[in-house]
């Protein structure tokens, strides 16, 4: 039983790292732009496709393929922010509808370009197995966890130790006040959306080699990412991190005692329980104009 | 100039009459309804299904169509992408049987969608010939307008259970789709397994899930001797990769989707070696009917033939044969009557529907050899070495 528990905790941490990346992107975009972007999962998927494409057809280097995916997705993020979400600023209802429409557009564009069959993303890191006592895990799983933690650290450093990061936090707290003190709120919005897009590309690039690259590959991470920011508290970086890892571990470990087809339900039951006790999530706070 | 035009016209007529002769006779078209999936999670199996229909239609039309009541008809296919959804399937079925007025509808991938389409077929008296869904209840409900060319999950399970029982692979675990195909398959196996085979861990996953780590852990903990993967190519390749990576010492048993060269490309010979799978259409079997179809399919689509394609190919020919025997291309009840009694020797084997509309095609078990080829293990009288599966 302990062996199974250890295996599932590791698997949960690995999945949690993906959820964290997705949750951070969602949280940043929602926290700063007040946009609940349901197309974020489609961006994760697009990131996976682009990384696979660069690796298979441009340069057979995984780090460069990830970089290529991020670079290629940034203009897409810019177009979405400027063309779709900026005109719908402060109109949450239409933003949600627009983002759901974008999911259909992006998924069907991918179908047209790459076809309906899932693509394989063969990497040496998925074949190299690392012994861990009597268990074995692929190098790619360790890479996902490491890259996830590195992104968290980089984002934390950016938000807390750079001038632009301070501007992002100020805009998140109160866009009007940020404007008054001379912050270019439009630029902050564009850069924040770009960072969110880059995180989506990173998540897709890490996820693709582990499993497959297919049009619905972002759906699950989107749902779990949303759950993570609700569990952790909307607007909290640490909330998204703890929430993402918690959901990954809870859903993986729960399968040791309950049927696997209920694992999604378990994660959401835990969220419901937490929200009953802490309506703003684990690390969420009520803001002055919200109370 | 006038003589030039007359000569040209004469040459055109002569040329038209000389091109095969038969196509020039076909003046009428009959439209057959197809429900399948070209987009979404079921697009990949849908492609194989449609390949079968398209190849059959091309061959029928290439031979000048078919004759009913002294008229020659060419076949047109009216294809609806219903995404394996019950709601979309019902809507498409309603449209096909009313607005499009087709005499027969074929296809479908999902038993749930087929179940929603079946009552509409009956209400509008248009035969529905299923070529892929395996849920046993689709024919067990005795809807007189529903026929199924392919083996249902009980028929598949019966053959496989017989094979597993002879191997003594106990306890037997499952990873299965959390839908009619997966749950139906597990139930079918559970009912068919001989007493010497005990059930181990049974885990279900939702369509679109790609992470099988939880199942791998549970299979290891359960001490299973074998695990059966009730799923198609894409999740199957992932489940096998994850089982092999975790070094779980189990015999892997797959479905017909896992016995093809395409599947080998997804993984490799080392990870597939020893794995067995049931199969409705081993494309390399040393049988003339199978070899001829496999060759034509490969020439047309550039890849190894697929069981779904073979079943769908036969399905369209069965529909045409029924119209010929019923001597009508419009009268649904007469075509249904002909379907109920016809016998057709297709590429998957002899197709003859029982009182519930279910055919009983042969089921094979093939095994991957160490070199990436396949052999036939079951039925025993069809057993053949590596390269024949």
Image (spheres, rainbow, N blue to C red):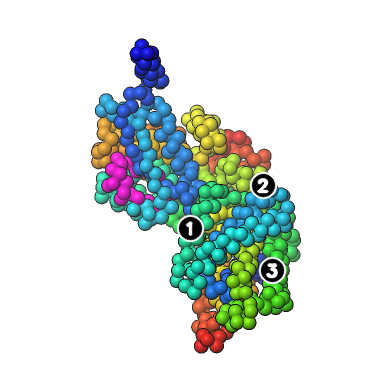
* Closest to the observer, A121 or B359: A121
Residue A31, magenta (yes or no):
no
Tell me the magenta residue range: B92-115
Q: Which mark is residue A40?
A: none
Residue at x-position 54% and y-position 76%: A230
The part of the image, by quadrant, that contains residue B244 is: bottom right
Report whether A241 appears left or right of B14: right
* Closest to the observer, A58 or B124: A58
* Closest to the observer, B291 or B16: B16
Residue B156 percent across, percent down from the top left: 46, 46
Residue A199 percent across, percent down from the top left: 64, 65
Structural crowding at the residue carrying mark 3, measured as other residues with C-alpha within 10 Å and reported as few (<14), some (14–19) or many (≥20) = some
Q: Secondary structure at mark 3?
A: helix
Residue bearing mark 2: A57
Residue B104, magenta (yes or no):
yes
Measure the C-alpha gap from mark 2 to mark 3: 27 Å
Question: In this view of the protein, can residue B119 be seen by the observer?
Answer: yes
A79 in relation to B121, above or below: below
Residue at x-position 43% and y-position 46%: B132
Report whether A215 appears left or right of A156: left
Structural crowding at the residue carrying mark 1, measured as other residues with C-alpha within 10 Å and reported as few (<14), some (14–19) or many (≥20) = few
Residue bearing mark 1: A104
Q: Secondary structure at mark 2?
A: helix
Residue B248 percent across, percent down from the top left: 65, 57
Chain of the residue that carries numbered disc 2 in the rendered image = A
Residue bearing mark 3: A151
Q: Earlier in the sequence, mark 1 or mark 3?
A: 1
Assign the N terminus of chain B to one quadrant of the image.
top left
Residue at x-position 32% and y-position 46%: B96
Chain of the residue that carries numbered disc 1 in the rendered image = A
Q: Secondary structure at mark 1?
A: helix
């Amino acid at each position: 039983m302990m062996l199974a528990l250890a295996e599932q905790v590791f698997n949960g941490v690995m999945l949690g790292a993906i959820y964290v990346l997705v949750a951070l992107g969602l949280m940043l975009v929602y926290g700063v732009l007040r946009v609940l972007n349901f197309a974020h999962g489609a961006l994760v998927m697009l990131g996976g496709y682009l990384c696979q494409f660069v690796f298979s057809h441009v340069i057979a280097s995984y780090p460069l393929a990830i970089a290529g995916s991020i670079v290629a997705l940034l203009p897409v993020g810019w177009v979405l922010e400027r063309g779709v979400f900026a005109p719908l600023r402060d109109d949450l209802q239409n933003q949600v509808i627009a983002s759901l429409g974008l999911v259909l557009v992006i998924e069907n564009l991918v179908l047209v370009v790459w076809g309906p069959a899932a693509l394989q993303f063969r990497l040496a890191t998925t074949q190299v197995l690392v012994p861990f006592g009597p268990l074995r895990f692929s190098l790619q799983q360790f890479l996902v966890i490491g890259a996830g933690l590195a992104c968290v650290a980089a984002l934390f450093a950016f938000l807390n130790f750079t001038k632009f990061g301070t501007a992002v936090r100020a805009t998140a707290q109160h866009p009007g006040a940020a404007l008054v003190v001379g912050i270019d709120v439009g630029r902050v919005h564009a850069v924040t959306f770009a960072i969110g897009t880059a995180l989506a590309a990173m998540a897709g690039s890490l996820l693709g080699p582990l499993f497959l690259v297919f049009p619905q590959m972002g759906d699950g991470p989107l749902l779990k990412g949303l759950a993570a920011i609700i569990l952790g508290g909307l607007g909290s970086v640490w909330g998204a991190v703890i929430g993402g890892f918690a959901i990954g571990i809870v859903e993986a470990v729960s399968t040791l005692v309950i049927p696997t087809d209920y694992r999604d339900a378990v994660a959401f039951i835990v969220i419901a329980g937490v929200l009953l006790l802490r309506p703003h999530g684990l690390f969420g706070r009520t803001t002055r104009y919200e109370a | 100039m006038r003589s030039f035009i007359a000569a040209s016209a004469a040459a055109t007529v002569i040329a038209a009459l000389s091109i095969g002769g038969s196509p020039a006779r076909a003046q009428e078209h009959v439209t057959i309804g197809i429900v399948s999936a070209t987009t979404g999670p079921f697009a990949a199996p849908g492609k194989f299904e449609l390949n079968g229909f398209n190849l059959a239609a091309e061959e029928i039309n290439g031979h000048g169509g078919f004759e009913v009541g002294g008229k020659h008809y060419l076949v047109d296919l009216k294809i609806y992408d219903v995404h394996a959804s019950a709601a979309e399937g019902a809507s498409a079925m309603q449209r096909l049987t009313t607005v499009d007025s087709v005499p027969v509808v074929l296809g479908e991938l999902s038993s749930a969608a087929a179940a929603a389409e079946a009552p509409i077929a009956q209400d509008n008296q248009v035969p529905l010939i299923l070529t892929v869904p395996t849920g046993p209840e689709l024919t067990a409900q005795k809807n007189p307008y529903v026929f199924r060319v392919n083996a249902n999950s009980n028929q598949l399970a019966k053959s496989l259970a017989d094979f597993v029982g002879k191997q003594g692979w106990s306890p037997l675990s499952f990873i299965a789709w959390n839908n009619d195909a997966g749950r139906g398959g597990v139930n079918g196996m559970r009912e068919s397994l001989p007493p010497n085979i005990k059930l181990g861990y049974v885990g279900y996953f939702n369509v679109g899930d790609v992470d099988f780590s939880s199942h791998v852990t549970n299979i290891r903990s359960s001490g299973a001797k074998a695990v059966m993967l009730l799923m198609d190519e894409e999740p199957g390749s992932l489940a096998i990769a994850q089982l092999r990576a975790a070094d779980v010492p189990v015999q892997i048993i797959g479905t017909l989707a896992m016995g093809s060269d395409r599947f080998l490309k997804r993984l490799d010979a080392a990870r597939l070696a020893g794995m067995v799978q049931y199969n409705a259409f081993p494309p390399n079997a040393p049988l003339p009917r199978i070899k001829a179809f496999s060759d034509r399919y490969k020439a047309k689509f550039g890849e190894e033939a697929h069981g779904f394609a073979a079943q769908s190919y036969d399905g369209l020919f069965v529909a045409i044969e029924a119209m010929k025997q019923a001597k009508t291309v419009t009268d649904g009840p007469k075509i249904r009557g002909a379907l109920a009694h016809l016998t057709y020797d297709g590429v998957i084997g002899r197709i003859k529907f029982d009182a519930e509309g279910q055919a009983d095609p042969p089921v094979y078990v093939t095994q991957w050899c160490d070199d990436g080829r396949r052999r036939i293990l079951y039925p025993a009288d069809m057993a053949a070495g590596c390269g024949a599966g």
